[in-house]
Image (spheres, coloured by chain):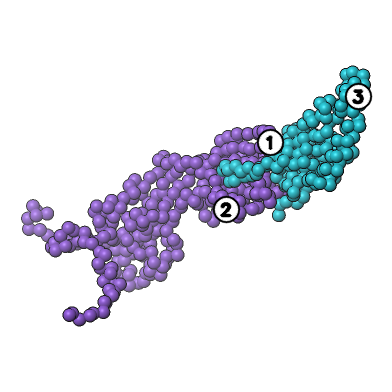
């Protein structure tokens, strides 16, 4: 049995986060999941018509990368990568399983999730993998960190972008 | 003390004359200087023959000129008006814009907003083309010498007011005169273009490539202007999926445009014949010399 990181400690951390994210930091994004059944793909593994579930609002921590500009024959083009830390308990409450390819809506821009990292464990362990008796109530996965890149808004078809 | 005189400004003519420099070193030479347009030192004007310089005033046809820009425009015209590439995306049909490569930044970002979203990110599909090289083609024809063109394309013109013919002309053994328009044989060239099609999806790319490939080996251009044969030999597909970037579906192909150029430049205007008339009457006269060695 471990000395720290019991269920009670986890609840304390969770309650702090539940207050910190929505009431103090209040950085919010919308989260879209691709509706797999409706978005039919062709042999190249692509769907020209995509369908998404209704967006869910999350309070997150955002690290915004700078807008990057590249120039080629087509002229200047822009891109951006952002990193978002989701409170795992919020995702569980919303019944959202974050996956690569999900869409995040932030400040009128759409970002496609490139990576999903679940590696912030309270006291370094999670109760789902308790190899010794008594450890099933210790530790917790606090956050899920995702990196996402800017997607041309018209590609998704969520909002009308072309005139 | 001298009288104070008001300065008298030179007239425009006096200023012009003061700017002129004589062709000969000695301005007092008895040899009359050649007019500027017959300067033998300049190869472009050394063989000017005034008899060929017939005025084209009042002509309805402008002298033919075909520039490189005209050839470039044929591609834009053909894509926009004949191929009309379009793709299906998110329930709508989207026409594919075509742009010339490497535009100025302000134009690309601020003026060409129709293919950019509000972040100035390029929205696909889009087609870019740009000229990469121009090869001269000697197999078709040549004007032979730019300083004194020899080969012309000649077109007879319909009756004009200046070509009047009456019974009086018939009595004087005159034949009807026809005016002809002469155009220097153009410089035949093969212009190579690099084109890139950029789409979000391979399915969209297939449709565009099919349309472009179908139009290969045909004559591209505005029927009211110039048409040139375009040839496309191969298409190269390029699909990349890098971390932190959008999935790129691009296809490169090269267009070979068999065209010609008739430039609108001063040395052509000075030397080349633009208009001439048929002979209305030919006279033979007799000259007698007392000594054949004097011929």
To which quarter of the image does residue A35 belong?
top right
B293 w.r.t. A135: above or below:
below
Q: In which quarter of the image is the N terminus of chain B?
A: bottom left
* Residue A64 percent across, percent down from the top left: 70, 42
Of the chain colours in the picture, the one used for chain A is: cyan
Q: Quadrant of the C terminus of chain B?
A: bottom left
Discs 2 and 3 lie in a common subunit: no
Which of the chains bears the disc numbered 3? A
Q: What kind of element bears circle 1? A: loop
Give the CA distance from mark 2 to mark 3: 62 Å
To which quarter of the image does residue B183 belong?
bottom left
Discs 3 and 1 lie in a common subunit: no
A97 w.r.t. B114: above or below:
above
Is mark 3 in CB contact (under 8 Å) with mark 1?
no
Relative placement, left or right, of A52 versus B223 is right
Decide which of A131, B136 is in the foreground and name it.
Answer: A131
Give the CA distance from mark 2 to mark 1: 27 Å
* Residue B101 percent across, percent down from the top left: 55, 45
Discs 2 and 1 lie in a common subunit: yes
Q: Which mark is residue B244?
A: 1
* Residue B160 percent across, percent down from the top left: 42, 67
Of the chain colours in the picture, the one used for chain B is: purple
Which of the chains bears the disc numbered 1? B
Read off the residue under disc 2: B107
Q: Which mark's residue is nearer the viewer, 2 or 1?
A: 1
């Amino acid at each position: 049995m471990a000395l720290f990181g019991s269920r009670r400690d986890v609840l304390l951390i969770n309650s702090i986060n539940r207050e910190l994210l929505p009431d103090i930091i209040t950085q919010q994004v919308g989260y879209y999941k691709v509706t797999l059944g409706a978005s039919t793909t062709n042999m190249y593994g692509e769907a020209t018509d995509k369908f998404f579930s209704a967006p869910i609002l999350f309070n997150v921590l955002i690290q915004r990368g700078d807008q990057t500009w590249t120039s080629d024959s087509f002229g200047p083009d822009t891109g951006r990568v952002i990193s978002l830390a989701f409170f795992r308990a919020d995702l569980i409450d919303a019944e959202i399983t974050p996956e690569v390819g999900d869409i995040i809506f932030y400040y009128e821009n759409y970002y496609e999730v490139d990576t999903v990292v679940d590696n912030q464990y309270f006291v370094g362990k999670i109760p789902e993998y308790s190899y010794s008796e008594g450890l099933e109530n210790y530790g917790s996965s606090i956050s899920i960190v995702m990196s996402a890149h800017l997607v041309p808004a018209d590609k998704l078809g969520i909002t009308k972008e072309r005139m | 003390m001298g009288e104070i005189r008001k300065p008298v400004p030179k007239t425009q003519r006096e200023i012009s004359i003061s700017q002129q420099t004589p062709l000969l070193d000695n301005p007092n030479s008895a040899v009359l200087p050649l007019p500027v347009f017959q300067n033998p030192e300049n190869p472009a004007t050394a063989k000017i023959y005034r008899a060929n310089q017939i005025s084209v005033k009042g002509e309805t046809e402008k002298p033919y000129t075909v520039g490189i820009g005209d050839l470039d425009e044929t591609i834009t015209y053909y894509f926009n008006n004949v191929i009309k590439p379009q793709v299906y995306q998110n329930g709508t049909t989207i026409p594919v814009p075509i742009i010339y490569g490497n535009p100025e930044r302000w134009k690309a970002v601020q003026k060409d907003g129709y293919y950019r979203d509000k972040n100035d990110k390029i929205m696909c599909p889009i087609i870019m083309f740009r000229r990469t090289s121009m090869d001269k083609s000697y197999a078709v024809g040549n004007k032979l010498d730019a300083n004194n063109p020899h080969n012309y394309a000649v077109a007879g013109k319909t009756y004009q007011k200046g070509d009047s013919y009456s019974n009086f002309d018939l009595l004087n053994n005159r034949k009807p005169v026809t005016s002809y328009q002469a155009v220097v044989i153009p410089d035949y060239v093969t212009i190579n273009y690099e084109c890139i099609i950029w789409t979000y999806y391979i399915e969209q790319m297939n449709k565009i490539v099919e349309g472009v490939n179908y139009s290969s080996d045909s004559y591209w251009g505005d029927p009211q202007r110039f048409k040139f044969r375009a040839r496309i030999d191969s298409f190269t597909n390029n699909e990349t999926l890098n971390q932190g970037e959008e999935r790129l579906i691009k296809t490169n192909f090269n267009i070979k445009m068999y065209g010609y150029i008739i430039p609108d430049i001063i040395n052509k205007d000075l030397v080349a014949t633009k208009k001439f008339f048929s002979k209305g009457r030919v006279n033979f006269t007799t000259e007698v010399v007392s000594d054949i060695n004097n011929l």
